[in-house]
Image: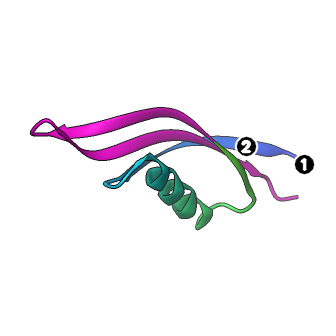
């Protein structure tokens, strides 16, 4: 790997944490090339009526810069 950059993104899912991570990476891949890694910094759940209704992850993505 040459030079890399790290950015922070947030993604949501109604079904689970892993789905939120996958959706975030999939969406970021539409704008970024050469994503090399992801670090989940924070996990949050949304609650309604005493039940978990969704998940939110805050993550850092590392991608390689073009030459």
| Residue 25 placement (x, y as % from top left) | 57, 56
| Residue 41 placement (x, y as % from top left) | 54, 32
Above or below, 41 against 28 in this view is above
The kind of secondary structure element at disc 1 is loop
The kind of secondary structure element at disc 2 is strand
- Residue 46 picture quarter: top left
Q: Dot 2: within a 10 Å radius of its alpha carbon, few (fewer than 14), some, or many (20 or more) residues? A: few
Specify whether 9 is left or right of 52: right
Specify whether 42 is left or right of 54: right
Query: Per the image, is 21 magenta?
Result: no
Circle number at residue 5: 2
Q: Which residues are magenta?
A: 39-67
Camera-side residue: 25 or 31? Answer: 25
The structure residue drawn at horizontal position 31% and vertical position 54%, both measured from the top left corner, is 14
The structure residue drawn at horizontal position 90% and vertical position 48%, both measured from the top left corner, is 2
Residue furthest to the bottom: 30
Circle number at residue 2: 1
In this figure, what is the number of numbered marks? 2
Q: Quadrant of the C terminus?
A: bottom right
């Amino acid at each position: 790997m040459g030079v890399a950059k790290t950015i922070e993104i947030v993604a949501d899912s109604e079904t689970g944490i892993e789905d939120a991570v996958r959706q975030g990476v999939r969406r970021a891949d539409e704008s970024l090339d050469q994503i090399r890694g992801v670090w989940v910094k924070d996990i949050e759940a949304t609650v309604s009526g005493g039940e978990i209704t969704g998940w939110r992850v805050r993550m850092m993505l590392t991608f390689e810069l073009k030459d």
